Image: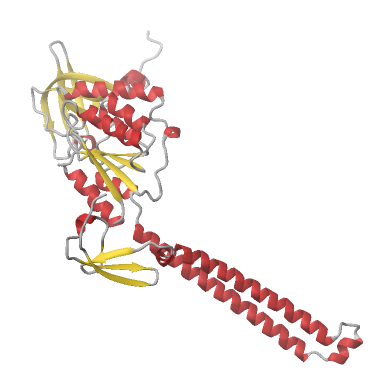
Amino acid sequence: MIEQAFTVTEINNYIKSLLDGEPALRNVQIVGEISNFKRYPSGHCYFTLKDSGAVLKCVMFRGKAMSMRFEPQNGDTVLAIGRIAVYERDGVYQLYTDMLLQQGVGDLMIAYEKLKAKLEAEGLFAEERKQPLPVNPKTVGIITSPAGAAVRDIITVSRRRNRGIKLLLFPVKVQGEGSAREIARAINFFNRHNLADVLIVGRGGGSVEELWAFNEEETVRAVAASAIPIISAVGHETDFTLCDFAADKRAATPSQAAELAVADAEGFILQIENLERRCRHLMTARLEQEEYRLDRLSNSWALKDPERIFAEGALRTDAAYTKLVNKMDGLLKESIHSFELQAARLDNLSPLSVLARGYSVTQKDNFKVVTSIEQVRWGDELITTVGDGKIVSVVQSVEEK
């Protein structure tokens, strides 16, 4: 007789625990041909992977299926990535699929995972290697295609946040043969000549093949080695490349990269104005408080009986009163001096103080600031603001550096 008998449920649960505890089956990659593919109204997908010798049942739940970039068809050869587990009710094991990749793309993903593991082991993705982004950069380097939407988005957002920011574009191919070499060369060029405070490297979204330049070892090593902080802006939110891991900061889109790189000048000005108002309010309140205390002490002293003070052995009334007034006057002068120091510090932050040091601002056409010789032509009327007024002039000639 058998000493111990299992129920069907118990044996299925036992086998499930064995498979769940096997690390090699938690993230397995399987190549096969799809058959009996069906997507249900719930969004879940059920299908079979097969080769010449066997079949494997598979399921892909709605959350994972929504991220597929293609609609699988019976007969497609794919790479399926997921975990092997037992479905207890039916007593069958199946592949719980997290990702399906078309033939060819699967080979790229295998190469991606191998290179990622290699570079990660070398420490290229370590957090301690990452540099902080500059708070208020003056020059931003852009490495991308000159014809794509990415460069237009970066320029638009950057100009909106800070009209005075300097943008340097190094045009490169962002897909196809030789694109990785061009991107790496551009990064090295900016570093060699120290041309920018921060770099944006990226492009718009695309397929795995289209984004592959940003997964090549030459590109990733150039990003990791850059002495200039780099923001990786490759693809959309769901696209991750190896450059994203190596960069100092990752942006989901090129527009977000511009927001991370370029300081909001108007926001800084509003913050300074707010601090100035708060400082003046606090200093005014402090002065009023000290004046009120002085008045109270003065009134209190005036009401005292001099004969009683002398009777108690106190100092002479006039001497004590003078000492008190001098002390309060000193406190008042100290408060005024502190207020003047704070006001002077705030004044140094004012654009007017910059003009007073010999700088100027030139405007034309409805007060548009002139930042380049390309904005003016012979005969244009210009208004130049200096520290003590404005100068109106007419352009006679334009000379390049």
Q: Nearer the viewer, residue 25 or 312?
A: 312
The answer to whether residue 94 is seen in the rendering is: no
- Please name the residue shown 68% across and 74% down the image: 331
Quadrant in the picture for the N terminus = top left
Please state the horizontal and vertical placement of residue 84, each as a whole percent of the image.
28, 22
Please state the horizontal and vertical placement of residue 246, each as a whole percent of the image.
35, 32
Q: Which of 54 and 389 is in front in this view?
A: 389
* Position of residue 282 in the picture relative to residue 143 (left or right): right
Q: Nearer the viewer, residue 340 or 73?
A: 340
* Position of residue 257 in the picture relative to residue 127 (left or right): left
Q: Which of 87 and 203 is in front in this view?
A: 203
Q: In this view, does 219 lie above or below 323?
A: above
* Position of residue 302 in the picture relative to residue 182 (left or right): right
- Please name the residue shown 39% across and 63% down the image: 269
- Please name the residue shown 76% across and 90% down the image: 302
- Please name the residue shown 14% across and 42% down the image: 147
What colour scheme was applied to this rendering of the protein? secondary structure
Q: Which residue lies furthest to the top in this view?
A: 1
Please state the horizontal and vertical placement of residue 75, each as a whole percent of the image.
8, 22
The answer to whether residue 342 is seen in the rendering is: yes
Q: In which quarter of the image is residue 162?
A: bottom left
Q: In this view, does 91 lie above or below 130?
A: above
Please state the horizontal and vertical placement of residue 57, each as a whole percent of the image.
19, 22
Q: Is residue 191 above or below residue 93?
A: below
Q: Quadrant of residue 39?
A: top left
